[in-house]
Amino acid sequence: MSWAVGLPDDQICSFILRAEIEMKCGMHKWEQYPERPTRLLVTVKMFAGLAGGPTSGQRFIDYDPLRAYLKSLENGEHIAKLETIADGIAATCFADNQVDACSIRIQKPDIFNEAEAAGIEVFRSRRSWEKTT
């Protein structure tokens, strides 16, 4: 069994690394000005199990729908919590039936002067996601 409990040993990971988006989000008063969006760095990894043998003829995870979803956030309504954004990302990942699990990291690089970034990181398996949705 792999490091990701319940997933096959052999996996493929399709990812988007540190996508930069600007959107209206945050719970602090200074984050709620519509003319001043918050800059986010988003990394998403989508995992699918592989059978033995060469990888090229097996599962293919298309990251284009994920990219389109991330871009759509820039024109959306204000979202208070990063967890809400992560849930939308997870739903987008699991819309592809091949995705068994996803890892989501959302960083606010400009939130605190004394820190490189603040944010959240979430790992979701399809099994647990489908139990709750």
Image (cartoon, rainbow, N blue to C red):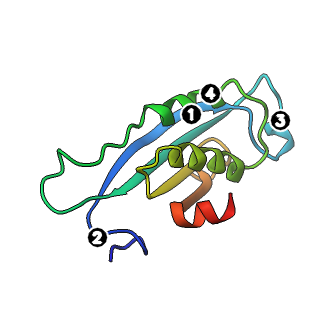
Residue position for label 4:
72
Q: Is residue 10 above or below residue 58?
A: below
| Number of numbered tags placed on the structure image | 4
> Looking at the picture, which amino acid does disc 3 mark?
Gln
Asked if the residue at tag 4 contacts the one at tag 2, i.e. Cβ–Cβ closer than 8 Å, the answer is: no
Q: Which mark is drawn over residue 70?
A: 1
Q: Nearer the viewer, mark 3 or mark 4?
A: 4
The residue shown at (42%, 73%) is 6
The residue shown at (28%, 70%) is 9
Task: Answer with mark 2 or mark 4, whichever residue precedes in sequence.
Answer: 2
CA separation in Å, label 4 and label 1: 5 Å
Q: Give the left or right position of residue 25, taking residue 102 as reference.
A: right
> Looking at the picture, which amino acid does disc 4 mark?
Ser
Task: Characterize the local packing of mark 4: few (<14), some (14-19) or many (20 or more) Cα atoms within 10 angstroms.
Answer: few
Q: Looking at this view, is 113 or 84 the one in front?
A: 84
Q: Is residue 101 above or below residue 98?
A: below
Q: Which mark is drawn over residue 123?
A: none
CA separation in Å, label 3 and label 2: 44 Å
Asked if the residue at tag 1 contacts the one at tag 4, i.e. Cβ–Cβ closer than 8 Å, the answer is: yes
